[in-house]
Amino acid sequence: MKIVHVVEPFASGIATFVQSIVQNLRDDYHIIIHGEREYVMRSNEIIKYFPEENVQFIRWRSAQRSISVVKDTVALVELCKLLQRLKAQKMVDAVHLHSSKSGFLGRLACRLMNIPNVIYTPNGAPFLLSNMNTVNLLYKLFEKLGSAFGGKVVCSSRSEQAAYRKLGINALNINNGIAVDTSHYTPGKVPAASGKFRIVTSARIVQQKNPALFNTIATHFKDFEQFEFIWVGDGEDRAVLTAPNITITGWLPQSQAMELINNSHLYLSTSQYEGLSFSVLEALSLRKTVLLKNCIGNRDIVKKGLNGDLFSNAQEAIVKIFQYYNNPAMLRIMGEYSGWLCHNEFNVDTTCLGYRNLYQRV
């Protein structure tokens, strides 16, 4: 099959998601129409991690993050032209749209180009982002309007699916999955007791990931020398992370990021919402205990008390961190369950088979 992926942004977890599909569906040919957010990661840095034999990249030059009637109209026209050309060359068996901006413009473009075989994976419901009800209402309207253009919405977690169905959109669910080569690491490794208790997260430093909450939690431990916090990644809200015990590494190659997670005691996520975080799944694969903000996406990963816990505010997270610090044996036991859970519920083979079957059905 010839599958066209439309991606904005082409970075972070969404890039990882597309990469996993391309790598695991090697008998299909993938054409990736992508935007670029240079301040996050340049596309040529991402492309080098893709296989060479079954993929083609096309730059979607006018795509951008912010909502603008003029700029988005330009991006829509460009996307229509790209899809029209590929359709004329018989290079479109299915179109897979990734993230909300691609989902809205892509479904409209496919409707205009009379392309019926369309799948949209939000990878995080955008109408859950803002604390302002009017903004969330606007995103809900966009999602419902986009759904009216056609295509099938496929959510990456059950809780995200429930949010879309509550909105009146009949979404499907295919869990995100990973296949991490852990042969270079020692999964379940807990750093020596003489070292600091390391708490790590890996994500863009943006509002969705709630760096302000991460900073509040870290600030509570600033006078405890035995605790350190590491944020792997970068982003526009970097200045929010002011606690002196937080280290910001910037963007690292996956192997280095994995090494930092592997050498940590605890993985912490303060996200406001997720689709299903690949970074958290990587932590599971390395048999790490996870402490996650109770939100859509995150709550599908935690089996409370077995591989970690959910928290609703900073105080709850702080109490849990002290409990983990004082019970290293509990960290090891929970970490083992994390590894089992990742293998059985978030396996990339199951994910890609689900999408392959869906490509054929649509």
Image: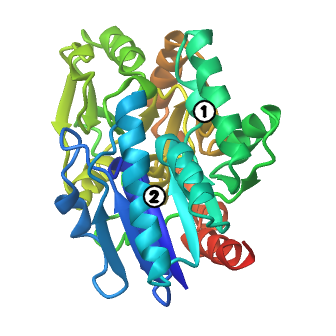
Residue 43 position by quadrant: bottom left
Asked whether residue 329 is in view, the answer is no
Residue 299 position by quadrant: top right
Residue at the spot of label 2: 80
Quadrant where the N terminus sits is bottom right
Callout 1 secondary element: strand
Callout 2 secondary element: helix
- The kind of residue on which mark 2 rests is Cys
Residue 178 or residue 26, whichever sits in front = 26
Which x, y percent locates residue 27?
49, 90
Q: Residue at x 58, y 38 (%)?
A: 308
Marks 1 and 2, the one that precedes in the sequence: 2
In the displayed structure, would residue 180 be above or below residue 155?
below
Which x, y percent locates residue 28?
49, 85
Colour setting: rainbow
Residue at the spot of label 1: 309
Gap between marks 1 and 2 measured at Cα: 45 Å
Label 1 neighbour load within 10 Å: few <14, some 14-19, many 20+: many
Q: Residue at x 55, y 70 (%)?
A: 348
Residue 134 or residue 275, whichever sits in front = 134
Label 2 neighbour load within 10 Å: few <14, some 14-19, many 20+: many
Which x, y percent locates residue 293?
55, 27
